[in-house]
Image (tube, rainbow, N blue to C red):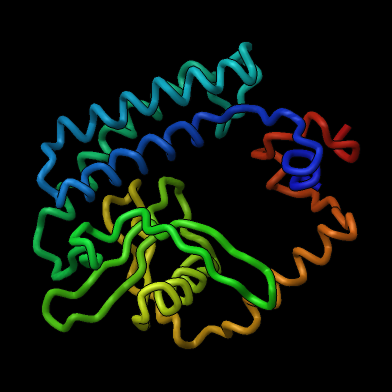
Amino acid sequence: MSYELERVLRLPSLPAGWLVQGTSIHEAADAWEKSHRTMPVEQAQEVFKDTWRREIAKADEVEPDRERWLVGGRKKVVNDLRDRYTGGLAQVYDYIDYNLADHGLRPYEMPDGSPAAEVGFEIEFANVVIRGYIDLLMQDTRTGELLVRDIKSGSKSPSVPFQLIVYRQAVREVLGEDVSFGDFFMTRDGKPTPPIDLTTLDEDLIKEWFVRQVELAEQGLFLPNPGDACRTCGVVQHCPLMN
């Protein structure tokens, strides 16, 4: 139902500090990676600040009353934004600090010589087109083995590495390279999760999920899924079930 309200009916979604923070961290990390890891940390933090100001301005246009913005826990919005701003700057520093150390992984070099950061892709599953971006395609400097990486600014890594499975298939189709492992770089922890074996997961099941989702959308079968996620749903104010 949240998909129907936000994506089909295009009703306004309440802003949230965690979305602003996440976008700002991603932009800073991407800029640093695309500089071939030569950008000074202070400059990467300026990218974070610029993105933060831009995203806050966009959020203010959607909902000028910040007291209506979504927050984690029982904080006031002003305190939540302050903490996420300072915390985000620290996470950008930690991201760079970790990756400057020699962990044996570097971004894969694309055919044009650029680092494989925010690599766009378009693949097809049973006539369903999937478009997206791979945060990072990493390469082991010792073995040449590839690893897909997704940057997460939240507190929990996904229970099912759905994105990484799709990234693996995208790398195979776009670059003709196979990837066996992936991980999530958790910016709150300042380090990635242990590598996740992607070869043991059923790719056909993932393809079926995409196809079924499109079939459900075409039939207008949007069902509510009430629970803890409602606390962080941006369109909950429009939800007939919750109201």
Give the image quarter of residue 68.
top right
Tell me where residue 220 appears, x and y as whole percent. 89, 55
Tell me where residue 82 appears, x and y as whole percent. 40, 21
Q: Residue at x 18, y 61 (%)?
A: 113
Give the position of the C terminus as an image quadrant: top right
Give the image quarter of residue 59.
top right
Number of numbered discs: 0
Tell me where residue 186 appears, x and y as whole percent. 36, 53
Q: Residue at x 33, y 34 (%)?
A: 88
Q: Residue at x 90, y 60 (%)?
A: 219
| Residue that protrudes farthest toward the bottom in the picture | 200
Q: Nearer the viewer, residue 187 or 75?
A: 187
Q: Nearer the viewer, residue 218 or 28?
A: 218
Q: Is residue 151 left or right of residue 8?
A: left
Q: Is residue 126 above or below residue 99?
A: below
Tell me where residue 223 appears, x and y as whole percent. 86, 54
